[in-house]
C-alpha cells in the first residue's frame, strides 16, 4: 500500500515538475515572478482535476475486486478510460462532466452468491464514492446480505435495479429519501416483510418491480398516492388480502400480481391497463362490468382462481387484446359461434370452467390463433367436454346461476371462516418468523426451490407492449432500448444544444423542415427537426400526431426522444415544432455494402442481421403501434447502422409532416424504388413496404447500387432462374466480397424470399412475418457453416465514425 502511494506521489511530482518548467520557460520573460506564481496555481488545479478523475476510476476498480473479478469486467484495468469505454450488454459506464452518472453491470443468469468474505456493507460504501450516479444497475452478480440503507446516500438516483441477487431482510426505510427515484427493481431476491407504507411518498416513481421475493402481508393503501406509477409487478411473493384501491392511478399500464394470495374481490383499477395478470390467487368474485371497457388491454390472465358468474364474451373482441386466459375458474355462460374476436387475438384459454354453447368460429379459424377449451360443457363433439348437466349442477352448487338469488352466508360459516383464517394466519406468521430467524442466524441462505419458476410466455409481458410508447413505462424503455425516456424539451434546452441553431449545427433543409445536430447537457448527440406550423393547425390535431411520434421507439428505428414547441407571441399558438431523434453515427447500410470501400464491406452474417433488423422495424411500424404506419417508401439509404452494426430505419411516414405539406406519397418515388403496382388501397399498403424491402435485400445480395427499374427486373429474373439452377450459378450473382462465405441453404433461402418480395402482384408477395421467419432461418443455417467474422480482406470489420445522418422522415 505504501509503495503504491509512493509511486503515485512520484508520478504526480514528475508531471508537476515538467508542467511547471514548461510554463516558466514560456512566460518568465514576459511576466517574471507573477507568471511563475500563476503557473504554480494552474498546475495545482490541473493536478487536483486529474486526481478527482482518478478517484472515480479507483472506485470502479475496487468494485471489480469486491465482485471477485467477474468475467463481465475483465476489460477493466488501471489504464482504461472508463468514460470513453465501449458499452456492451454486460457493462456500461456513462459520464458527464468527469463524473460517472450511469453504471450498468449485468452478470450471467444463475450466477452463484459471492464468497463468504464478501461484505455488502463495504460494497455499498464503495458505491457511495460515485455520488453523481443517476442510474445504477447491478443484476445477477451474486450480491448477498441485507441491502444497506446507506445506498440512499446516492441521492441523485433515478433508476435502481439490483435484481437476480441474494439480498434479504426488509426493504430499507432509507430508500424513502430518494426523491428522484423513477424505477425501483428488486426482483428475484429474498426480501422479506411487508411493502412499507412510505413507498407512497416516492412521488415520481414510475416502475415498482418486486417479483420473486419473500414479501408478505397486505399492500399499503399509500400505493394509491403514486400518481406516476405505470408498472406494478409483485408476482411470486406471499401477499394476501384485498388489493388497495388503484383506480386513482390513471397512468397504470402493467399490473402483475401472479402467484400470491390476493382476494376475494376483483381490484379497483383504471381503464388504461395494457397488461393485467391476476392468475394463481384467491379471487372468487364476479368480474366488474368495467373490465369490458379496457380498450387498451392486450394481456388478461385470470387463470387459477375461483372467479364466478357469467363470462363477458365481449372480452374476446377488445380492440387490442392478444392474450386471454380464464382457465381453471367457475365462469358460466353460453358461448355463441357468431361471437366476434379481435383481429390481434393470438391465444385464448377457456379450459376448466362451466361454459356451455358452441365455440366461436373466430377462435377456430386462422393459423395464428390458438384456443384451448377442454373441461367445459361445450357442444364441440370432443371427448374432453363434460355433459351439460355437470356444468349446470356445479353452477347451482356454487350459487351463480342468474335465476338464483344470492343468499347471505350463515353465521356458522362466518365463524368457521374466521377461525380458519386465524389458524392459517398464525401458521403463516410462524413460517415467516422461522424463515427470518434462519436468515438472521447466519446460516447458509439458499433460494427456496418453490421460488425457482421458469420464465415463459404465460408470465411475460406482451411483445407489442414492449414496442408501443403509449403502453410502456419510461424507465422500462430505458432498459429495453438504451434510450432516455421520451419527454418534452424546452426551447432554451434546444437552443443551447445547437448553439442557438448555429449554421455549424445545420445538417440540411428539406421539405419536411430544417435539420440540426445538437448536443445535450449529458453529452449525447441528437438530431432536431424544425417544422414551421400554420396558424390554421389546431393544437388538438397535431398533438394526436405527436402521440404517434412518441410511440416510434424501437431497436430498429431511429427513435424519437421527445419534442418541443415555440409559440407565437400574440396568441400563444404553436409556431414551430421541434422533433428530437437519436443520432446514429455510422452511416448508411449502402455505404457498408456498395459504398466502394472494399475493406469496409460487412460480411454475410451481418448482412442477414441487418435485413432481419429492417424487417423487424417494418413489422413494428405496421403492427406495433396503433394506427399502423404504412407506405414508408423505404430505401437502402434510409437504413443506418449504429456503432454495433444494428440496422435502424430512419425514414417513415409521419402524418404530421404530411399535413405540413412536406410529405410525398409512395407513388412519387423514382428510380429503382418505384413499385409497378402503385395501388392506394389500404389492404395493399403492407405489400408496398414489402416491395421496397425486396429492393433493399436485392442490393444486400448483389453488393451494388440499383440504377433503374429495368436493372431490378433483370436481376430479379436472374435470381429466379438461379434458384432452380446449381450452386455456382447462384453464387455468380452474389457480391464477390461474401460470395464464398455464405452457406448453400442460407443463400438460397435469402434469394427465394427476395424474389417473392419483388413479385408484380402485391397479393403474391409474402407477409412481413413470413419474411422474418425465412431470414431468421437463413441466419440459423449460416451460423455453424463457416466462420465469416472477417471481411473479404481478412481483417475484422469495425464501424468507422462518419459524421453524417440521413434522417429523412419521408422521401421527397
Image (spheres, grey):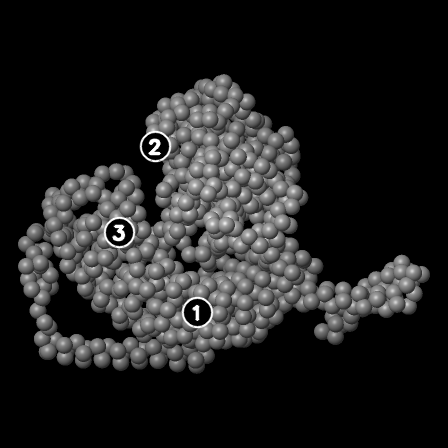
Name the mark on residue 324: 3
Sequence-first disc among 1 and 3: 1
Secondary structure state at the residue bearing disc 2: helix
From the image, state whether disc 3 or disc 2 is nearer to you.
Answer: 2
Q: Is residue 255 above or below residue 805?
A: below
From the image, state whether disc 1 or disc 3 is nearer to you.
Answer: 1
Residue 241, picture quadrant: bottom left
Residue at the location (23% across, 44% down)? 341
Name the mark on residue 682: 2
Residue at the location (40% across, 27% down)? 756
> Between 240 and 204, which is closer to the camera in this rendering?
204
Sequence-first disc among 3 and 2: 3
> Between 688 and 121, which is closer to the camera in this rendering?
688
Residue underneath mark 1: 202
Residue at the location (43% across, 65% down)? 205
Q: What is the spatial separation of the Cα atoms under label 2 and label 1, in whole angstroms?
A: 47 Å
Q: Cβ–Cβ below 8 Å for labels 2 and 1?
A: no
Amino acid at each position: 500500500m505504501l509503495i503504491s502511494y509512493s509511486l503515485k506521489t512520484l508520478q504526480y511530482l514528475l508531471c508537476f515538475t515538467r508542467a511547471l518548467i514548461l510554463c516558466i520557460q514560456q512566460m518568465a520573460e514576459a511576466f517574471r515572478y507573477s507568471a511563475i506564481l500563476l503557473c504554480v496555481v494552474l498546475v495545482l488545479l490541473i493536478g487536483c482535476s486529474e486526481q478527482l478523475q482518478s478517484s472515480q476510476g479507483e472506485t470502479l476498480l475496487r468494485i471489480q475486486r469486491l465482485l471477485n473479478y467477474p468475467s463481465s469486467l475483465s476489460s477493466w484495468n488501471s489504464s482504461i478510460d472508463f468514460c470513453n469505454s465501449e458499452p456492451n450488454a454486460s457493462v456500461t459506464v456513462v459520464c458527464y462532466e468527469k463524473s460517472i452518472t450511469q453504471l450498468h453491470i449485468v452478470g450471467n443468469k444463475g450466477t452463484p452468491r459471492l464468497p463468504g468474505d464478501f461484505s455488502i456493507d463495504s460494497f455499498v460504501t464503495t458505491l457511495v464514492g460515485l455520488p453523481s450516479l443517476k442510474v445504477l444497475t447491478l443484476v445477477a452478480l451474486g450480491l448477498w446480505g441485507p441491502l444497506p440503507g446507506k445506498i440512499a446516500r446516492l441521492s441523485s438516483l433515478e433508476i435502481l435495479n439490483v435484481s437476480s441477487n441474494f439480498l434479504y431482510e426488509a426493504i430499507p426505510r432509507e430508500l424513502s429519501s430518494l426523491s428522484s427515484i423513477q424505477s425501483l427493481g428488486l426482483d428475484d431476491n429474498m426480501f422479506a416483510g411487508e411493502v412499507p407504507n412510505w413507498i407512497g411518498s416516492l412521488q415520481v416513481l414510475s416502475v415498482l418491480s418486486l417479483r420473486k421475493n419473500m414479501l408478505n402481508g397486505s399492500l399499503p393503501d399509500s400505493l394509491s398516492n403514486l400518481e406516476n406509477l405505470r408498472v406494478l409487478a409483485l408476482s411470486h411473493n406471499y401477499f394476501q388480502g384485498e388489493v388497495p384501491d388503484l383506480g386513482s392511478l390513471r397512468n397504470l399500464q402493467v399490473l402483475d400480481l401472479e402467484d400470491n394470495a390476493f382476494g376475494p374481490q376483483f381490484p379497483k383499477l383504471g381503464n388504461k391497463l395494457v397488461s393485467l395478470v391476476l392468475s394463481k390467487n384467491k379471487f372468487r368474485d364476479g368480474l366488474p362490468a368495467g373490465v369490458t371497457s379496457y380498450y387498451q388491454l392486450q394481456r388478461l390472465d385470470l387463470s387459477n382462481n375461483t372467479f364466478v358468474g357469467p363470462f363477458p364474451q365481449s372480452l374476446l373482441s377488445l380492440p387490442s387484446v392478444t392474450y386471454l386466459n380464464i382457465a381453471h375458474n367457475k365462469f358460466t355462460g353460453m358461448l355463441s359461434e357468431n361471437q366476434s374476436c379481435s383481429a390481434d387475438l393470438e391465444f385464448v384459454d377457456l379450459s376448466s370452467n362451466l361454459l356451455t354453447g358452441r365455440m366461436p368460429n373466430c377462435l377456430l379459424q386462422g393459423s395464428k390463433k390458438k384456443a384451448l377449451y377442454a373441461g367445459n360443457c361445450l357442444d364441440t363433439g370432443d371427448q374432453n367436454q363434460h355433459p351439460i348437466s355437470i356444468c349446470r349442477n356445479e353452477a347451482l352448487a356454487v350459487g351463480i346461476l342468474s335465476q338464483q338469488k344470492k343468499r347471505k352466508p350463515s353465521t356458522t360459516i362466518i365463524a368457521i371462516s374466521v377461525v380458519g383464517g386465524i389458524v392459517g394466519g398464525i401458521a403463516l406468521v410462524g413460517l415467516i418468523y422461522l424463515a427470518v430467524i434462519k436468515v438472521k442466524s447466519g446460516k447458509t441462505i439458499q433460494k427456496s426451490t418453490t421460488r425457482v419458476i421458469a420464465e415463459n410466455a404465460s408470465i411475460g409481458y406482451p411483445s407489442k407492449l414492449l414496442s408501443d410508447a403509449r403502453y410502456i413505462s419510461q424507465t422500462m424503455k430505458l432498459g429495453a432500448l438504451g434510450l432516455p425516456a421520451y419527454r418534452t424539451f424546452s426551447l432554451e434546452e434546444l437552443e443551447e444544444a445547437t448553439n442557438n441553431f448555429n449554421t455549424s449545427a445545420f445538417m440540411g433543409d428539406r421539405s419536411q423542415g430544417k435539420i440540426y445536430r445538437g448536443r445535450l447537457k449529458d453529452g449525447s448527440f441528437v438530431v432536431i427537426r424544425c417544422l414551421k406550423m400554420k396558424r390554421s393547425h389546431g393544437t388538438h390535431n397535431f398533438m394526436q400526431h405527436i402521440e404517434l411520434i412518441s410511440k416510434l421507439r424501437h431497436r430498429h428505428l431511429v427513435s424519437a426522444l421527445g419534442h418541443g414547441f415555440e409559440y407565437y407571441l400574440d396568441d400563444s399558438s404553436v409556431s414551430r415544432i421541434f422533433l428530437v431523434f437519436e443520432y446514429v453515427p455510422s452511416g448508411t447500410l449502402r455505404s457498408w455494402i456498395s459504398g466502394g470501400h472494399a475493406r469496409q464491406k460487412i460480411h454475410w452474417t451481418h448482412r442477414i442481421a441487418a435485413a432481419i433488423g429492417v424487417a423487424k422495424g417494418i413489422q413494428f411500424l405496421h403492427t406495433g403501434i396503433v394506427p399502423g404506419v404504412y407506405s414508408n417508401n423505404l430505401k437502402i439509404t434510409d437504413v443506418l447502422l449504429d456503432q454495433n452494426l444494428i440496422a435502424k430505419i430512419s425514414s417513415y411516414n409521419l402524418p404530421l409532416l404530411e399535413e405540413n405539406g412536406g410529405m410525398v406519397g409512395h407513388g412519387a418515388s423514382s428510380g429503382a424504388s418505384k413499385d409497378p403496382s402503385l395501388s392506394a388501397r389500404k389492404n395493399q399498403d403492407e405489400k408496398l413496404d414489402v416491395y421496397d424491402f425486396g429492393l433493399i435485400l436485392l442490393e444486400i445480395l448483389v453488393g451494388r447500387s440499383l440504377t433503374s427499374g429495368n436493372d431490378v427486373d433483370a436481376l430479379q429474373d436472374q435470381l429466379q432462374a438461379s434458384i432452380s439452377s446449381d450452386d455456382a450459378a447462384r453464387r455468380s450473382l452474389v457480391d464477390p466480397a461474401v460470395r464464398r462465405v455464405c452457406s448453400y441453404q442460407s443463400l438460397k433461402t435469402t434469394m427465394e424470399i427476395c424474389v417473392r418480395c419483388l413479385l408484380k402482384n402485391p397479393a403474391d408477395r409474402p407477409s412481413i412475418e413470413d419474411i422474418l421467419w425465412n431470414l431468421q432461418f437463413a441466419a440459423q443455417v449460416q451460423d455453424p457453416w463457416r466462420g465469416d467474422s472477417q471481411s473479404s480482406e481478412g481483417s475484422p470489420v469495425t464501424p468507422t465514425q462518419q459524421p453524417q445522418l440521413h434522417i429523412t422522415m419521408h422521401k421527397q
